[in-house]
Image (cartoon, grey):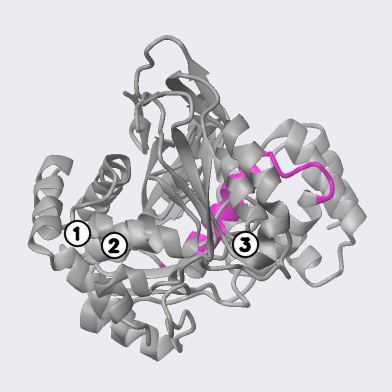
Amino acid sequence: MRAVDLIRKKRDGLELSNEEIGFLVKGYSEGDIPDYQMSAWAMAVYYQGMSARETADLTLHMAASGDMVDLSSIHGIKVDKHSTGGVGDKATIVLGPLVAAAGVPVAKMSGRGLGHTGGTIDKLEAISGFSVELGKEQFFNQVNDIGLAVVGQSGNMTPADKKLYGLRDVTATVDSIPLIASSVMSKKIAAGADAIVLDVKTGSGAFMKTLDDSIRLASAMVDIGTQVGRSTVAVISDMDQPLGHAIGNALEIKEAVATLRGEGPSDLQEVCLILASHMLVLGGKAESETEARMILKEKLESGAALDKLMAMVAAQGGDIAQIKDLALLPQAEILVEVKSVSSGYIESIQAEEIGIAAMILGAGRENKNSVIDLAAGVDLRKKIGDSVTIGETLAVLHLNKEHESGQEEAVNRVREAYGISSEKVQRRPLVFALVTPEGIKRF
């Protein structure tokens, strides 16, 4: 078997066998197939695509290239949740405790942020002492004891995907739906979940900017999950504006805790209830989304979900005093109000620009070596559909002195991210579609 023959085969639009895909993944991982041949194959896939079977085979071979987590020692059906990334997306910190309180174990491996999207692990590290590194036995025991653990991803998980993604990033082949889908799902399969709920973001702050592209990606990932025997559903949710009001690590922890107290923004609570409802159904704790929602609302109102968060924070070495008193979390030295220069109604918010502004203030990473300022970020005071007058505050920037040089740029980016109309504007839907093995349901 030769790589050049498989490149030609895919270039000509033919399907590769499972063995041929395995040969490519193994050869590239071990250094036997050079970058120039793998990049040629990735470009052929970019133009010719892959069948659902090919994409599933690629996913499994990438998952098997490194550590595969066996969660069988954890009791119950393990349901994982994955977001394709966005701005202000702190949903895991809300729905993890919420789902665990309802009896579905959450054994979550999360990543760090890069660029304008934030990472769950970075956010949790805003809590003093919180450890995202647990040994395997400690991880399993914690989930069995309290139903919830969130840790960083293993350093040797899906090494083939890491290597291939790095190549795609410099060869203009990142935005290939089969390659994106297999990259995401290989990590989910390697993480060992029995079922997967996908939160596929769409809009200006998402990787997929259009609804049609988001549905295509969601369908590809649901197909993979189905092909490899994992119950999988995907929710297409809005990222044409940030989720909630807070963007930045400690700020998002505060907002997540407020939501678990029943005091958070309505959009964040609603998205979390929708995703968590699907997790309960797949986890066998509810027969329908309606029944699941009733269970989840009771866990919010009773404080059981907040108690789960505090139990997880305590178990992973975090300071629960900061959960009880949010003023103890990292606080920025400087607050800067961004004022509106016109009156009307908020018509649009370029979420990616808000994310970049937060990054400039220190809340995110420009590269893998960047050091995050846990207190920095942006607090939005106006969302789409809200009215605004000249001089009214659109957002508040949180920054420390070491990032003062970026203040002017951040202010300009936030102000320019807001589109203001003289006409009244309808609020955007939070969810646009549901993708299941049975098909696509648009809302």
Question: For numbered disc 1, what is the local secondary structure?
Answer: loop
On residue 61, which mark appears? 3
On residue 261, which mark appears? 1
Q: Residues within 10 Å of mark 2 (few under 14, many from 20)?
A: many
Q: Tag 1: residue type?
A: Arg
The reply to whether callout 3 and callout 2 are in contact (CB within 8 Å) is no
On residue 237, which mark appears? none
Question: For numbered disc 2, what is the local secondary structure?
Answer: helix
The magenta region covers 170-192
> Residue 259 in the image: x percent, y percent?
26, 54
Looking at the image, can residue 355 be seen? yes
| Residue at 78% across, 45% down | 42
Looking at the image, can residue 287 be seen? no
Q: Tell me the quarter of the image containing the C terminus.
A: top left
* 102 to 350, vertically: above or below: below
- Mark 3 or mark 1, earlier in chain: 3
> In the depicted view, which residue is nearer to us: 4 or 39?
39
Q: From mark 3 to mark 1, how far is it between C-alphas?
A: 43 Å
41 relative to 272 in the view: left or right: right
- Mark 2 highlights which residue? 257
* 209 to 152, vertically: above or below: above
Which quadrant of the figure has residue 65?
bottom right
| Residue at 36% across, 26% down | 386
417 relative to 270 in the view: left or right: right
* In the image, residue 78 lies in the stretch drawn in magenta: no
Q: Tag 3: residue type?
A: His
Q: Tag 2: residue type?
A: Val
> Residue 423 in the image: x percent, y percent?
41, 9
